[in-house]
Amino acid sequence: MPTNTMNAIRLHAFGGPEVLRYEEVPLPELRPGEVLVRVHAVGINPPDWYLRDGYKAVPGFKPPVTLPVIPGSDVSGVVEAVAEDVQSFVAGDEVFGMVRFPSFGDSAAYAEYVAAPASDLARKPAGIDHVHAAGAPMSGLTAWQFLIELGHNEPNPFQSESHRPVPLDGRTVLVNGAAGGLGHVAVQLAKWKGAHVIAVASGAQEAFLREIGADAFIDYTRSPPEDVAHDVDLVLDTLGGPTTGRFLRTLKRGGALFPVFLGFSDAEEAAKLGITVSMTQVRSNGAQLTELGRLLDAGTVRVAIDSTYPLADARRAHERAARGHIQGKIALTVA
């Protein structure tokens, strides 16, 4: 382990993928309650490029960011050291986690080392490698907290009431954007919980989605899903935005629409139809990751990897993300 420096990706200005700079930075300091992780792989997620471009894609949301900053939250690696008060991990443990999300710290994922709160981490499933483990935390926790258990009592920044998952066993669940990082995990978790799952994606993804458990498939390039699906109990719209209201037409009275991104504006129509519209902010949770890890280890849930890039090539990874049509997750590898 280096004594005081490491390599990391930092932003010195907001902008396109070209602002991601690979450089030598100070090694993070270990504080009480934290674990120093030697990073083997990093999972990249939409909040990474939202931060990179100064949150232009998220109207009305601009948290204070002090530059330069290291982006990223999802890591898998090996414990290098633990603070004196940490008893849950020891040096040499393989761990994965979503670090500090949604807050910012001075130690983030696009780096050779991360100082992470022990409560954000779980032991890496032995049956998967670091790349697949790094792809799991944000996607897995978002799906878990939307669909299965919220797991915290923090205020909801998107609505006055807490988000409440709905029963899935025996229900029909439609997942829009089903082949993406969040979508493909949500398909598998809903299936695990006993739902009949309708996956919406482009036709090229049908075989993949049926393989991981989708019962029915809608190719949105051929037919708008709101014209095809009916009497659905729950829609998880992983794409969200201003068009998410179209899925009200697919739901039965008393159903639920869970948009993952801001933009829903049809509250009056939803109320007339008796449809619950709810969303939440995913938060780090090592205990939930431990539960998800058991499913990953058993093969009940698997993470698909679209592509991998060395940490130094984070720019190329973000360029890949910008092209869209991602199957699963994009990951960075750390030598």
Image (cartoon, grey):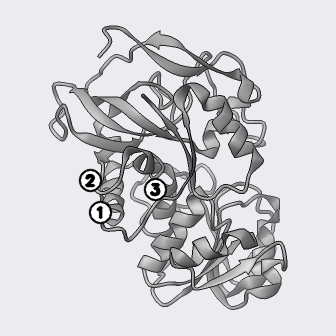
Task: Answer with the quarter of the image where residue 217 lies.
Answer: bottom right
The three-letter amino acid code for the residue at tag 2 is Ala
User: Which-is-in-front pick, marks 1 and 2?
Assistant: 2
Is mark 1 in CB contact (under 8 Å) with mark 2?
Answer: no
User: Disc 3 and disc 2: Cα gap in Å?
Assistant: 19 Å
| 252 to the left or right of 123 | right
Residues at badges 1 and 3 in contact (C-beta under 8 Å)?
A: no
Q: Name the residue beneath numbered marker 3.
A: 141
**Which residue has dot 1 on it?**
294
Residue 295 appears in the rendering: yes
Disc 1 secondary structure class: helix
Question: Is 226 or 200 nearer to us in this picture?
Answer: 200
* Label of residue 126 in the image: 2
* Callout in the foreground (1, 3): 1
Q: Position of residue 327 (x, y in %)?
A: 62, 59
Q: Is residue 5 above or below residue 249?
A: above
The residue under label 3 is which amino acid type?
Leu
- Mark 1 and mark 2 lie on one chain; the one further toward the N terminus is 2
Looking at the image, residue 51 lies above or below residue 3: below
**170, 27: nearer the viewer:** 27
Residue 323: % across, % down: 76, 47
- Tell me the kind of residue under disc 1: Arg
* The furthest residue to the top: 4
At x 44% / y 61%, what residue is drawn? 150
User: Does residue 214 appear left or right of residue 224 in this picture?
Assistant: left
Q: Quadrant of residue 309?
A: top right
- Earlier in the chain: of badge 1 and badge 3, it is 3
In space, the residues marked 1 and 2 are separated at their CA atoms by: 10 Å
Q: Residue at x 39, y 14 (%)?
A: 27
